[in-house]
Image (cartoon, rainbow, N blue to C red):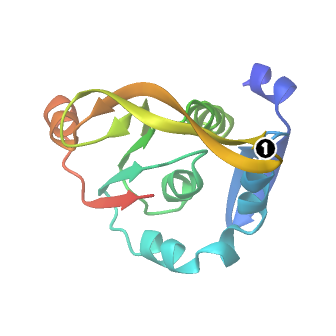
């Protein structure tokens, strides 16, 4: 835990009475703003998480730094097990830091894209723009990441999702 807090700023937020510690990467203003406005940003998602039954299994596809994963795992009566997936390295890294900061042990963090088949898949990285003939031209860099199927995760873990969120 100490290594993360020396590299990334840590903020304490309260979402519907649940205290959550989060890293806020300096270069990701959107991550910080999402954290600050958690309750106002998507209250219907928080309502959905609040309605999850105790002992359920939650698959968070597109977990990023863990907004929904963190809240669901820390709230009273939340899911017994959460498997979080993200194909963006920085999102998975930040979620790993947040899981450590909050001492969460019922979440499995997977750096992978989710798809029908397994293997490798090219996904967009960062949207960049270049100036060509005085006009901006957008270029989407691609990266190759592992892809896993939900069927494989269920077979490997024995966990059948009760709830699935896809971003």
Up the image or down, 30 lies above or below 145; here it is below
Q: Is residue 16 visible?
A: no
Up the image or down, 163 lies above or below 73; here it is below
- Taking the image as shown, residue 4 lies to the left or right of residue 98, namely right
- Taking the image as shown, residue 96 lies to the left or right of residue 135, namely left
Residue 42 image point, x, y percent: 59, 75
Residue drawn at (62%, 40%), measured in percent from left and top? 139
Residue 77 image point, x, y percent: 43, 63
> Secondary structure beneath disc 1?
loop
- Taking the image as shown, residue 67 lies to the left or right of residue 147, namely right
Total numbered labels: 1
Residue drawn at (65%, 32%), measured in percent from left and top? 97
Q: Is residue 154 visible?
A: yes
Residue 99 image point, x, y percent: 59, 37
- Residue 13 location, quadrant: bottom right
Residue annotated with mark 1: 133
Q: Which residue sits furthest top?
A: 3
Quadrant location, the N terminus:
top right
Residue 5 image point, x, y percent: 81, 29
Residue drawn at (56%, 46%), measured in percent from left and top? 64
- Residue 163 location, quadrant: bottom left
Residue drawn at (82%, 40%), measured in percent from left and top? 27
Q: Which residue sits furthest front?
A: 133
Quadrant location, the C terminus:
bottom left
Mark 1 residue crowding within 10 angstroms, few (<14) / some (14–19) / many (20+): few
Viewer-side residue, 91 vs 46: 91
- Residue 158 location, quadrant: top left
């Amino acid at each position: 835990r100490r290594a993360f807090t020396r590299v990334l700023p840590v903020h304490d937020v309260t979402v519907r009475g649940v205290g959550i510690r989060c890293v806020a990467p300096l270069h990701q203003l959107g991550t910080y703003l999402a954290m600050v406005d958690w309750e106002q940003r998507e209250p219907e998602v928080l309502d959905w998480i609040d309605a999850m039954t105790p002992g359920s299994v939650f698959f968070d596809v597109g977990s990023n730094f863990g907004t929904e994963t963190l809240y669901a795992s820390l709230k009273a009566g939340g899911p017994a097990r959460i498997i979080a997936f993200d194909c963006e390295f920085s999102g998975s890294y930040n979620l790993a830091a947040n899981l450590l900061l909050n001492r969460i042990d019922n979440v499995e963090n997977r750096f992978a894209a989710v798809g029908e088949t397994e293997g490798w898949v090219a996904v967009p990285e960062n949207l960049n723009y270049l100036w060509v003939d005085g006009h901006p031209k957008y270029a989407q860099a691609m990266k190759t990441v592992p892809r896993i199927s939900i069927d494989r995760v269920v077979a490997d873990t024995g966990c059948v999702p009760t709830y699935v969120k896809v971003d």
